[in-house]
Image (tube, grey):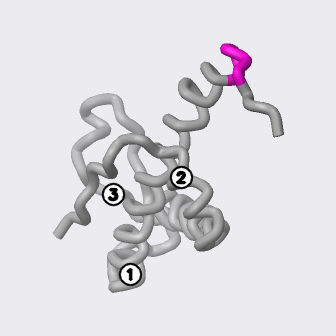
Amino acid sequence: MADITDPEAIRFVNDYIRPMCENLRYMCARGKDWKIKWDGGLSADFPNDTSPVVDGRDAEGISRLTGADIQAVSAVFSTLLADIDAAAEAAINKPCVRPLLYSPSE
């Protein structure tokens, strides 16, 4: 087996693979916390209709979300998280060099 020494390949690992794996590792940890909260009852707070989320953010020019928007995002989160099994998580964790700076919210 030959060593991989091409500077462009090494730069790719350090500029893309490692940082993206750290982002995915964070997403997995955050996603586990999200799933606990969502399945624990918060999903019932968001009917799958046009009920608006009244957070005052539209005054800042940020889009107003509806219950249906949150349900749609939830479906995407569920699909993404379901695709990350133990083998995928191990593959994602190996290139990481920084400690995971995440703690679940209360």
- The amino acid type of the residue labelled 3 equals Val
Q: CA distance from mark 3 to mark 2?
A: 39 Å
Say the numbered circle drawn on residue 77: none
Indicate the secondary structure of the residue bearing disc 1: helix
Mark 3 or mark 2, whichever is nearer to me: 2
The part of the chain drawn in magenta is 5-9
Q: Could you tell me which residue is drawn at 34 percent across and 29 percent down?
A: 61
Foreground residue among 46 and 85: 85
What residue would you read off at disc 1? Answer: 44
Specify which label sits upstream in the sequence, 3 or 1.
1
Would you say 103 lies left or right of 6 here? left
Q: Name the front one of labels 1 and 2.
A: 2
Q: Which mark is residue 94?
A: 2
Q: Residues within 10 Å of mark 2 (few under 14, many from 20)?
A: few
> Of the residues shown, which amino acid type is indicated by label 2?
Lys
Marks 1 and 2 sit apart, C-alpha to C-alpha, by: 37 Å
